[in-house]
Every structure is written in structure tokens, then in C-alpha cells.
Amino acid sequence: MRLSVNVDHVATIREARKTTYPSPVEAAIVAQEAGATGITVHLRLDRRHIKEDDIEELKKVAKKLNVEISTNEEMIKLIAALKPDQVTLVPEREGEITTEGGFNLKATLSDIQRAVNILVDSEIETSIFVDPNIDEIKYINQIEGLSICEINTDLFAKRYPDSEGEIAKITDFAKALKDLGLKVFAGHALTYWNLDPITKIEEIEELNIGHGIIARAIIVGMREAVKEILSKLP
């Protein structure tokens, strides 16, 4: 099971004082030296943390760069030109603290397909962020060109350790995605302390962890925070 480290909140600290430090690029280098196999960032419409310049610089150092964006048409065109290794489409609401959940696929299917078409034409591997609702499988199956689904683990994390029901949903959903021929990733609100049940789901190939690692890094350092997570992965 691979680990992609989200370095958004390194940029959040930088933007709190409008300085040039701490650097998400430096954080990405250290995270990869510690064993992370990729880096993730979210380029938001309001540019509250990560900027286009960060993506340009991260492309130079990341083993695999995954950029999360909304399906906003201008954003899709921008990221298609920047050409990261992977794009993960996520719902985005103005004023939200963080991504609040996966797509309502029935309501957004046409927007997602339009975005996927542009990204795939630009030779960018494309993922969507989805809740582990088995009813969504029929809509996912309709999206042409999609190669990855990232499962939202937020509700699992909120209910942990009383989360057996959520783990069962995630497991069944991961198996269904795999049956569609998709790569299965997972992330949101995962930490060293709640990770164990997720690591037992064989279909999940990669975890995307950001806040839990950056928050821990303030106490023990980036290298150690990444290594702690990696020590949990099969």
C-alpha cells in the first residue's frame, strides 16, 4: 500500500503570514526521502494555500504529483496545461474548511465526464473522490476514461473506533470498484491512530494523507511523521 502525502497545510502556514516559508516543495522532498511514493495538493478556486507556482515547482521534485481540483471549467483547462501526473476531481464549496464529502454523482455526472474527457485528452490519469455508497457504482461505471476512484474515509474516521459498519461499507465499495477495473485509493481524516482497519482492505492501493501528517510533523518533524504512517502500511 503506497502513501501520497498532501502538503497543502504547509502552504497554509506559509500563507498565514504571507511569507515564502515553510515551503511545500521542501516538505515534499523530505516526505519522499522518508518513503512516500507521491505528493498531493489541492488547487482551490480561492487559492487559499497552494498556488500555480507551487505546482510548477512540485512537478520538478515529486515522484508522482496528484492535484485535486473542482470540475470548474477554467480550472480544468488550467490544470490540463500544467500537466501533473494525476488529477483527482473533488466537490468544492465556497467557504468550506475542507472537502466535505464525495460527489453526488447523479447530479454531477455530466460535469465530471466533461472534465475527465479534457484531462484524459491531455494524457493525465484521472480520479474522482467518492463516498463509499454502493449505489454510486452504477454512475461510476458510466464515466468513460476514469482510471482511479478515491474513497472518502471521513465518516469512518469520525466514528472510529466504533466504525465496523463504515469499514464494511468501504470494503464492499472497494471490491466493487476493483471489479470495474479501477484503481482504488482512499483518504480523508486518516491518522496514525485510526489507520489500522483501512490498511487491512486489500483492494486499496494508495492512501492520501495530509492534515494528519502535517499536524504530527509539527511535533515530531516531517520525516518521522511520514515514517510513522508507513510503519502501519502492509
Image (cartoon, rainbow, N blue to C red):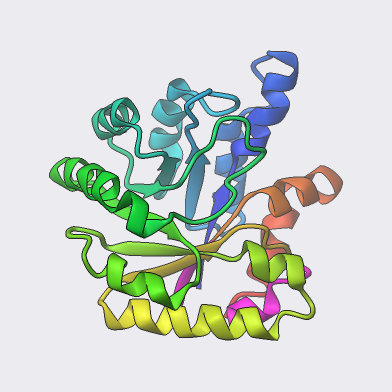
Residue 151 placement, left or right of 181:
right
- Image quadrant where residue 130 sits: bottom left
Q: Residue furthest right?
A: 219
Task: Check the image and report above or below for 174 versus 13.
Answer: below
Taking the magenta stretch, the answer to whether it contains residue 199 is yes
Q: Nearer the viewer, residue 175 or 193?
A: 175
Where is residue 91 drawn, in percent x and y?
46, 45
Q: Nearer the viewer, residue 11 or 35?
A: 11
- Image quadrant where residue 142 sits: bottom left
Taking the magenta stretch, the answer to whether it contains residue 100 is no
Q: Which residues, given as a range, are shown in magenta?
A: 193-207
Residue 233 placement, left or right of 185:
right
The residue sitting at 55% across, 54% down in the picture is 101
The residue sitting at 44% across, 28% down in the picture is 57
Where is residue 204 drawn, in percent x and y?
47, 75
Residue 65 placement, left or right of 95:
left
Task: Check the image and report above or below for 177 versus 64.
Answer: below
The residue sitting at 54% across, 28% down in the picture is 50
Q: Quadrant of the C terminus?
A: bottom right
Where is residue 14 drawn, in percent x and y?
69, 23
Can residue 202 be seen? no
The residue sitting at 49% across, 47% down in the picture is 39
